Image (cartoon, rainbow, N blue to C red):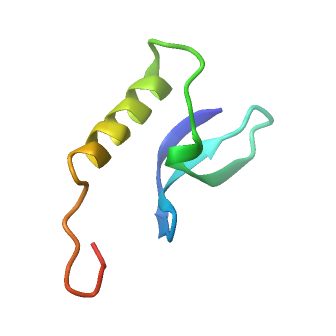
Amino acid sequence: MTVLGTGDGSDDDGMLLRVRLADGDEQEALADQLYAIETPGVNATVLDDYRAFVAEGGLPLDNDGEW
């Protein structure tokens, strides 16, 4: 699997990332459910950066709970 970037938004469980699977198909997946097997590597860096972003509070939400 390769992380391609952010997905089209988020769902109630968190941020979606766009990924390419080993068979070439692309799909969106929850970032919190993805782990990099090969470290160091690009996927590991993206996922580590995402987790650091979340740990710092992520994006501020407005009054409606939207980013």
Image: 13 above or below 41 = below
- Screen quadrant of the N terminus: top right
Name the residue nearer the viewer: 35 or 46.
35
Image: 11 above or below 44 = below
Image: 3 above or below 64 = above
Name the residue nearer the viewer: 23 or 31.
31
Name the residue nearer the viewer: 24 or 57.
57
- Screen quadrant of the C terminus: bottom left
Residue 20 shown left or right of residue 59 in the figure: right
Residue 53 shown left or right of residue 42 in the figure: left
Residue 46 shown left or right of residue 2 in the figure: left
Number of callouts in the render?
0
| Residue depicted at x 50% and y 71% | 12
Image: 46 above or below 67 = above
Residue 49 in picture, x, y percent from top left: 32, 35
Residue 54 in picture, x, y percent from top left: 31, 48
Farthest-out residue, right: 23
| Residue depicted at x 46% and y 24% | 44
| Residue depicted at x 23% and y 73% | 61
Residue 48 in picture, x, y percent from top left: 37, 30
| Residue depicted at x 22% and y 53% | 57
